[in-house]
Amino acid sequence: MKTWFITGATGGLATAIISQLLERGDRVAATTRKKDALAALESEYGAQLWVTALDLTNPQAVNGAVNQAFQIFGTVDVLLNNAAYGLYGTVEGISTKQTGEVFSVNVFGSLNTARTFLPHFREQGGGQIIQIASMAGQYSAPVTGMYSASKWAVEAAFEALATEVEPFNIQTTIVEPGGIRTNFVGGNGVFGEDPIAYQDTKVEKMVRLMKGDVPGMDLATYEKYIAGDPEKMAHQIISRVDVGKGPLRLTLGSDAYQKIKASLEARLAALTEQKTVAYSTDADDYVAR
């Protein structure tokens, strides 16, 4: 039996994870913006599930929730940073305020929680951090620029953190899911105000697609174009925790695998072509280490 602390606990992926954990006997501390959303599971599983409302952008609130979870359960084995804010539109059309909001949740919220957990994990002799990132953390595309920017920042921060905390028996996994059959984009995504100049361009078509506005296509048909099954993804994340040590990154979904692979191959090819230029700028007395 393990004890989990899960942020953003009312999304499709998080709900699937929590349900599977409770069914097998694990304990869960779940944080959410809508506390009543897990009322049915609370009623069924009682003290096995503790739910609290939490604003991840408030470090003091995060500290209070984490400390309370340890007081209630005695120990927490796994931090699952799942909470995320979806923001889409052109870089030009997304406001400074919206940019700040997506970074506040996706980057600073995740870091606030991880930082609060680390002293507890060290004290108890170890733990696991599961950071939900995105396939968008490995590439960027029109309409996803600012969302991708936040996920790239998550990837960079938690890649460094993974090495820093490994000596304390704290394992870190960055999960990179592709599209998931939830309402994260069309239902809960936030969109910028794209300038009129982008009308009748590829950008406008992509925004409409992400909103689920596809003429002649109902929701059931549209969903078939989304690869990720949240139940199957939940199973793989839980299995990864059970195994323990493993690769830093866990890619979920054929769409994620294909897009990340294509992006990395293209970037590597472009880098290789620049090798001569890169080496030509070294100082004459440079000593490689």
Image (spheres, rainbow, N blue to C red):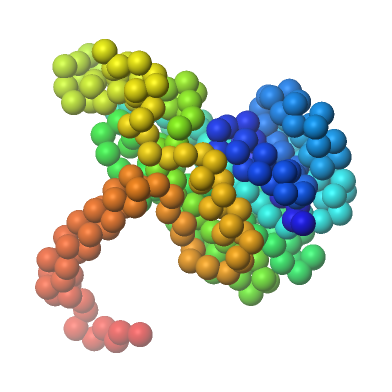
Pick the quarter of the image with the C terminus.
Answer: bottom left
Q: Note whether 76 is above or below 248 in the view shown.
A: above
Q: Residue at x 80, y 32 (%)?
A: 44
Residue nearer the viewer, 289 or 222: 222
Q: Is residue 222 above or below residue 84?
A: above
Q: Is residue 60 visible?
A: no
Left or right placement of residue 268 versus residue 57 in this view: left
Q: Position of residue 43 (x, y in %)?
A: 82, 29
Q: Is residue 180 above or below residue 280?
A: above
Most foreground residue, 26 or 263: 26
On the picture, is 246 further left or further right than 176? right
Query: Picture quarter containing residue 31?
Result: top right
Horizontal side of residue 256 vs 15, given as left or right = left
Q: Is residue 99 visible?
A: yes
In the picture, the quarter occupied by the N terminus is: bottom right
- x and y percentages locating residue 270 in the rendered image: 16, 60
- Nearer to us in this view, 285 or 61: 61
Residue visible at 42% across and 54% down in the picture:
251
Picture quarter containing residue 240?
Answer: bottom right
